[in-house]
């Protein structure tokens, strides 16, 4: 695995030991960023279920200012930490061990908003797409023109819309599919109380 383009172009990425993670292939990653970028002018990215951190790192290499990496696997988080350090991106990365749903509450409590969200849960957890994309909007974690990039099994068809998240492109690569959602308008609903109440802070792996 490598960084495809940008400041860190061609640099190798360490893989997570074992077979519990399913990293996005270089071919799929290159195609994905050609669709949503290919380059960015600042802003924040959120890499949920980060694995190796390859997607968030690619975004940093292509101009995203800061990236937040989340996972529950300590081996994955150690790999992300090593990769961002090796590439000189440590100061632009926040790495946390936490459940994705709880983590969104914490991030909302900080008032963060993201231009780019990568969503790649285990394929069998199909219900998480609806839950997390909806929660990202309800907690106002997205900018007005945010992109959500959801990787899933090609056998699963995700909805065309989740609230104000509208799918504008679907790309398939064999058994893998990528649904690209765009937020065209911030949700008008008041954020839920969990966004502002005191929540358990995430365990940092930085």
Image (tube, rainbow, N blue to C red):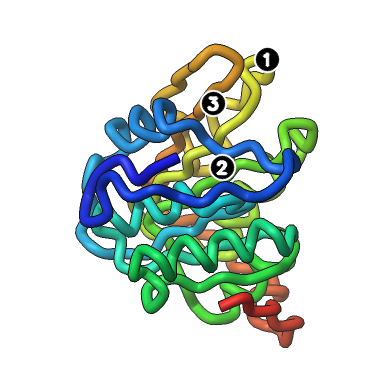
The quadrant in which the C terminus is found is: bottom right
Nearer to us of marks 2 and 3 is 3
Q: Is residue 170 left or right of residue 202?
A: left
Q: Position of residue 111 (x, y in %)?
A: 49, 78
Horizontally, is 131 left or right of 108 in the view? right
Residue 140 can be seen in this image? no
**Along the polypeptide, which appears first: circle 3 or circle 1?**
1
Badge 1 is on which residue?
155
Between residue 176 and residue 131, name the one nearer to us: 176
Q: Position of residue 196 (x, y in %)?
A: 64, 81
Q: Provide the residue designation for mark 2.
A: 163
- What crowding class fits label 3: few (fewer than 14 Cα within 10 Å), some (14-19), or many (20 or more)? some
Q: Nearer the viewer, mark 1 or mark 2?
A: 1
What residue is at 65 percent from the left and 23 percent from the top? Answer: 153
Q: Nearer the viewer, residue 160 or 27?
A: 27
Q: Position of residue 157 (x, y in %)?
A: 63, 19
Name the residue rendered at 20%, 59% in the picture: 41
Where residue 193 sits, quadrant-wise, is bottom right
Say which quadrant the N terminus sits in.
top left
Q: Are marks 3 and 1 in contact (CB under 8 Å)?
A: no
Find numbered disc 3 in the image and state the secondary structure of the residue it sits on. Answer: loop
The disc placed on residue 160 is 3
109 shown above or below 74: below
Disc assigned to residue 135: none
Q: Is residue 115 above or below residue 126?
A: below
Q: CA distance from mark 1 to mark 2?
A: 23 Å
Give the mark nearer the N terminus: 1 vs 2. Answer: 1
Q: CA distance from mark 2 to mark 3?
A: 10 Å
Disc 1, SS: loop
């Amino acid at each position: 695995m490598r960084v495809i383009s940008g400041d860190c172009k061609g640099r190798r990425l360490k893989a997570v030991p074992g077979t519990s993670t399913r990293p996005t292939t270089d071919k799929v990653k290159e195609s994905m960023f050609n669709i949503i970028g290919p380059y960015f002018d600042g802003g924040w990215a959120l890499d949920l279920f980060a694995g190796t951190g390859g997607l968030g790192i690619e975004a940093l290499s292509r101009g995203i200012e800061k990236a937040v990496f989340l996972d529950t696997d300590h081996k994955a988080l150690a790999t992300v930490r090593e990769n961002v350090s090796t590439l000189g991106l440590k100061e632009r990365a926040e790495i946390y061990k936490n459940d994705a749903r709880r983590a969104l509450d914490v991030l909302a409590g900080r008032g963060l908003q993201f231009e780019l969200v990568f969503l790649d849960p285990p394929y069998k957890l199909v219900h998480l797409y609806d839950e997390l994309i909806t929660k990202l909007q309800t907690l106002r974690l997205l900018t007005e023109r945010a992109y959500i990039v959801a990787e899933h099994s090609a056998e699963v068809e995700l909805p065309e819309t989740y609230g104000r998240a509208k799918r504008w492109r679907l790309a398939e690569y064999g058994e893998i599919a990528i649904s690209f959602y765009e937020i065209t308008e911030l949700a008008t609903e008041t954020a839920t109380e969990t966004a502002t109440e005191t929540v358990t802070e995430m365990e940092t792996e930085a």
